[in-house]
Image (spheres, grey):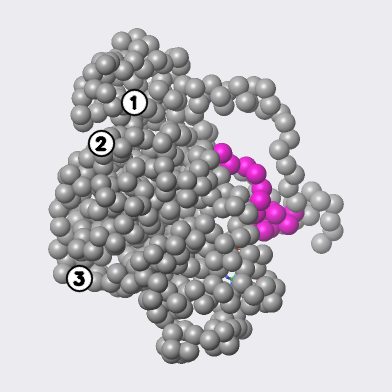
């Protein structure tokens, strides 16, 4: 049966002819387009939704544009803009008590609803990308086609392979990763079209193509870094009939273990998106607002993710746990753990993996990893240590009295799962996070371009000017 797509927004009409699918040719005819195949591709689904989304925003702004949405205190200005409502992020919303919802769905709901690999238990990140971008849960067939499309786009240019190969092994994997993603600028359809001159209505389409290419190529880039720094430098080819996480696991060298592949599917799904204000998401969006290509925008976000207070914490956690284990040995008693926590705090360090700028409860991303561990590695000594820290740390941090959230975040658990399966190189962990984060932040960049989000430019003042503003004499 033919699928008819209706478009009611004139601004999008010119780009419709550029919607392309590897599986079929689509003819566009005025306001309608017809596809002879049964399954709608991601780009078709998105193209169909965008006019409605644009209308929704227009209507909201026309009706309520001058409505006051909050007030800002001087403390918030000096306090990292914490809690200032100033961003639009469609894919996810973070509730301080409940945690993240992706397009209104909790992590357990996503685990239930999103398509899985044949015989698999965990959701495929392809499905989450689809959900974040369109707001809809894709069919199994749509996810299989997206897996095939990412596999088809996965080739990495030779000069980027050489660039990675020339990096010294002691250059941090995140720096190598960001370098390679920046260099992908060479392939950017958006940058090329912009240089030639394109109407604004075409921005989203080129951003979509770049984002798909980027996501498709990231595992091969990441695996090359991993295999160069820690192994024999050889990276297996992408298998065109396999899903994204399988291929990534295989390229890293772990495809023998089906549980590790399942872990990768879960890991790559839950690390994607955490609303718009975190450093990696906000940076990608901010840089993108200057119409920098998806490659340049994402690499900027990755540089933020590489900070120890953000994504690098998952590296820090494993190192910290290993140091603790070395010191306390097999004594996992409450006193030994309590003493170690206090020694960390007294030396002026943060307890990595604990605390959060928004969350005030245990991170559901932590919970889903804990549940995975309970199913697959309940007797692992490092998991037992993580569980003991989970029992003790909230009390110690509360007594310490500084952090607003004494509970664990996503990074408190991931390293322990990875090391169990033999991926022990903690300095690589944030690269895994980065591959997943791309799947979360690029959908918003595509939406930004479709809805014509402007260049971001908040107002700053000097301390003297702020003092004047609040009537203070310094
Ligand atoms: N250990 C010790 N002190 C902590 C702490 C922790 N885990 N978490 C927060 N604090 C301290 C802060 O350093 C701050 O101290 P100062 O007043 O001396 O500066 C105070 O408590 C108040 O901080 P907060 O308002 O509770 O937290 P922030 O929003 O400022 O920071 C975060 C949030 C995540 C950076 C912080 O909790 C932290 O440093 N945690 C450890 C690092 C970590 O796990 N980061 C990963 C977060 C998830 C991710 O992005 O991947």
Mark 3 secondary-structure assignment: loop
Find out whether the residues at labels 1 and 2 contact each other: C-beta distance under 8 Å: no
What residue is shown at x 22% (from left), y 53% (from top)?
247
Viewer-nearest of discs 2 and 3: 2
Viewer-nearest of discs 3 and 1: 1
Kindly identify which residue carries mark 3. Answer: 231
Find out whether the residues at labels 3 and 1 contact each other: C-beta distance under 8 Å: no
Kindly identify which residue carries mark 1. Answer: 44
Question: Which secondary structure type mostly characterizes the magenta part of the structure?
Answer: loop
Crowd class of label 3 (few under 14; some 14 to 19; many from 20; radius 10 Å): few
Task: Specify which label sits upstream in the sequence, 3 or 1.
Answer: 1
Q: Is residue 82 magenta?
A: yes
**Residue 81: where, in percent of width, then height?**
64, 53
Count the marks: how many?
3
Task: Specify which label sits upstream in the sequence, 1 or 2.
Answer: 1
What residue is shown at x 25% (from left), y 60% (from top)?
258
Q: Disc 3 versus disc 1: distance between alpha carbons?
A: 41 Å
* Residue 290 shows in this picture: no
Kindly identify which residue carries mark 2. Answer: 145
- Residue 206 vs 423, above or below: the answer is above
**Residue 399: where, in percent of width, then height?**
69, 77
**Residue 137: where, in percent of width, then height?**
41, 36
Q: In the displayed structure, does residue 247 sit left or right of residue 178? A: left
Mark 2 secondary-structure assignment: helix
Question: Which image quarter has ligand 1?
Answer: bottom right
| Residue range corresponding to the magenta coloring | 74-89
Q: Disc 2 versus disc 3: distance between alpha carbons?
A: 32 Å
Observer-nearest of 308 and 335: 335
Observer-nearest of 453 and 412: 412
């Amino acid at each position: 049966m033919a699928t008819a797509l209706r478009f009611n927004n004139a601004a999008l009409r010119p780009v419709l002819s550029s919607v392309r699918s590897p599986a079929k040719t689509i003819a566009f005819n005025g306001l309608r387009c017809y596809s002879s195949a049964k399954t709608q591709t991601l780009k078709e689904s998105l193209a169909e939704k965008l006019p409605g989304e644009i209308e929704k925003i227009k209507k909201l702004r026309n009706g309520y544009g001058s409505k006051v949405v909050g007030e800002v205190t001087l403390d918030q200005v000096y306090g990292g803009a914490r809690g200032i409502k100033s961003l639009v992020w469609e894919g996810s919303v973070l509730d301080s008590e409940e945690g993240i919802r992706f397009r209104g769905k909790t992590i357990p709901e996503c685990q239930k609803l999103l398509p899985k690999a044949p015989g698999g238990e965990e959701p495929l990140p392809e499905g989450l990308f689809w959900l974040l971008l369109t707001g809809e849960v894709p069919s199994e067939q749509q996810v299989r086609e997206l897996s095939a499309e990412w596999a088809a786009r996965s080739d990495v240019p030779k000069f980027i392979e050489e660039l990675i190969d020339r990096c010294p092994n002691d250059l941090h994997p995140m720096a190598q990763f960001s370098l390679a993603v920046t260099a992908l600028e060479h392939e950017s359809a958006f940058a090329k079209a912009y240089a030639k001159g394109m109407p604004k209505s075409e921005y989203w389409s080129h951003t979509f193509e770049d984002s798909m290419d980027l996501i498709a190529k990231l595992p091969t880039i990441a695996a090359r870094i991993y295999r160069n720094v820690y192994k024999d430098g050889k990276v297996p080819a992408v298998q065109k009939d396999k899903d994204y996480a399988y291929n990534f696991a295989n390229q890293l060298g772990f495809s023998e273990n089906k549980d590790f592949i399942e872990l990768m599917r879960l890991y790559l799904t839950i690390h994607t998106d955490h609303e718009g204000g975190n450093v990696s998401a906000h940076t990608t969006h901010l840089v993108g607002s200057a119409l920098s290509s998806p490659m340049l925008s994402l690499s900027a976000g990755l540089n933020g993710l590489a900070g120890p207070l953000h994504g690098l914490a998952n590296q820090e956690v494993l190192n910290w746990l290993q140091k603790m284990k070395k010191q306390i040995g097999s004594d996992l008693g409450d006193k030994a753990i309590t003493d170690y926590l206090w020694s960390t705090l007294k030396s002026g360090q943060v307890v990595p993996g604990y605390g959060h700028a928004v969350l005030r409860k245990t991170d559901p991303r932590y919970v889903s990893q804990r549940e995975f561990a309970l199913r697959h590695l309940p007797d692992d000594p490092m998991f037992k240590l993580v569980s003991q820290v989970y029992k003790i740390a909230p009390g110690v941090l509360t007594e310490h009295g500084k952090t607003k959230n004494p509970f664990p975040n996503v990074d408190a658990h991931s390293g322990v799962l990875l090391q169990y399966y033999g991926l022990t190189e903690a300095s690589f962990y944030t690269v895994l996070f980065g591959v997943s984060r791309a799947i979360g932040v690029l959908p918003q960049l595509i939406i930004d371009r479709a809805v014509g989000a402007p260049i971001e430019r908040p107002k700053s003042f000097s301390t003297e000017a702020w003092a004047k503003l609040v009537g203070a004499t310094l």
